[in-house]
Amino acid sequence: MLYQEKHRPQLHFTPKENWMNDPNGLVYYEGEYHLFYQYNPHGNDHANMNWGHATSTDLYHWEEHGVALAPDELGTIFSGSAVVDKNNTSGLFESNSGGLVAIFTHDGASQQQSIAYSEDKGRTWIKYEGNPVLPNTEIKDFRDPKVSWHEESKQWVMVLACGDHIQFYGSPNLIDWTYLSSFGKEYPSYIGVWECPDLLYLPVENNSKKEWILIVSINADGPNGGSAVYYFTGTFDGKEFHPNETPQDELKWADAGKDFYAAVSWDNTEDTYWVGWMNNWQYAGVVPVSPWRSAMSLARKLSLFEKDGSLLLKQEAITADNSREEVSYKDETVHPGKPESYEISDTAQVDLQVSTASASTKWSVQLVTDQDEAFRLELDYKEDAYTFYRTDGLVDFSADYPKEIKGSLHGMDVQNLKVIIDRSSAEVFLNDGLTVSTNLIYPEGTVTKLEISTVNETLQLDTVTWTKLHSIWK
């Protein structure tokens, strides 16, 4: 039965069938959040790129609408963005109140930027007859335009991925674009290319300021191999981005898990939300699922947090489930060598609040199935690191998949932990989302149990709460 297949996510968006990758055209308009995405309507592999389309009123429950933009004589439809042209700066709309404009990469003989517009809330699109609006014949990788309105300079600003760097362009009308500046050639790009950039202006929670952040996805050579997302903080003056980080500084990974990529934000929202593709290019084409392939992460609210003079990205997962069932335990104590066990479901949110009196500096949580498969997250304060293990279940489809997944705790002991489990994924949020790790899992059984263990000292927990989350497809 559709949406009930083995490993089909129940809390994350997936198309009914066929291949999906990068989120595209994220925009909020007249009560709807739009999620466009790279989509192959003809098969379960990365080919024939169209834009698929889904909408939501709460960033959690989604309705799929089918193909929004299809290939034409200029090429297939690669990634891009969408904006609300509320003042009709483009002149494309009959009404001065404007409408939606999509900005995307045509992938043909070369990669060029084109636009389309919609006058019916994104249900149908008209491609601009003068496409491409930003032609290119020289740069091989010239794609993934992310466009937003920059109020201070009174222009649309495009952030564009260009191989080993980012280029900025400005426009008064979404049609006529002028080169502004470049950024990043002096920063490491490893063996991969920069993709899917974004430019955000985010509040800093603990000092009441706002700061600019430049998002870059890199494929390949992420912190655990394959594709990943990192970011720079700094200033943007309408022309140039000036980073706080130097080329010698350690890279800031938005999500050091294995399966979070191409994340971009929604346009036209008061708070800032983004979503990422929950997969990795090392094995995306062979993950053991059908008739769909790939899911989106949960949407996340973004902010910044200042720690020791450095800005860290903070992410809060959106789970708008009003029918949730919650079970909570207070004042739990875990002794070395004596794991504590709790019954849970395979679509659940687990929340642990660590007591300030807790002595343990090395402890773990693991998800256990009814076939005794285990997926373990180990926390080690002295090493300032976490490690996620997924060697159980289906693993033989890729040699890269079952390797250990490591990330930083950013010099902080864990005060709280959230894990959102959804049949074939585990999204981990530590310290209110200052450390995030997103990872696929493919158990042959069903997750039924949470086990908490400590290695060296007693672990004291103020609360252990697990919440059953109901399917978004019912």
Image (cartoon, rainbow, N blue to C red):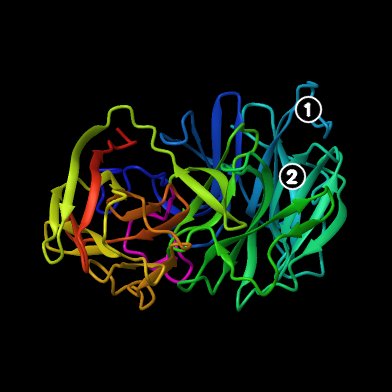
Q: Is residue 34 left or right of residue 139?
A: left
In the picture of the structure, the residue carrying the numbered disc 2 is 115
- Depth check: 455 or 245 in front? 455
Q: Is residue 287 magenta?
A: yes
Q: Considering depth in this image, is 11 or 284 the residue closer to the camera?
A: 11
Name the residue beneath numbered marker 1: 93
Image quadrant assignment for residue 33: top right
Q: Is residue 92 left or right of residue 385?
A: right
Q: Amino acid at mark 2?
A: Ile
Q: Looking at the figure, which quarter contains the C terminus?
A: top left
Give percent across and percent down for residue 411. 46, 63
User: Vertically, is 341 above or below 338?
Assistant: above
Image coordinates for residue 60, horizontal then vertical, percent: 42, 36
Q: Which range is magenta? A: 279-297
Secondary structure beneath disc 1? loop
Q: Are marks 2 and 1 in contact (CB under 8 Å)?
A: no
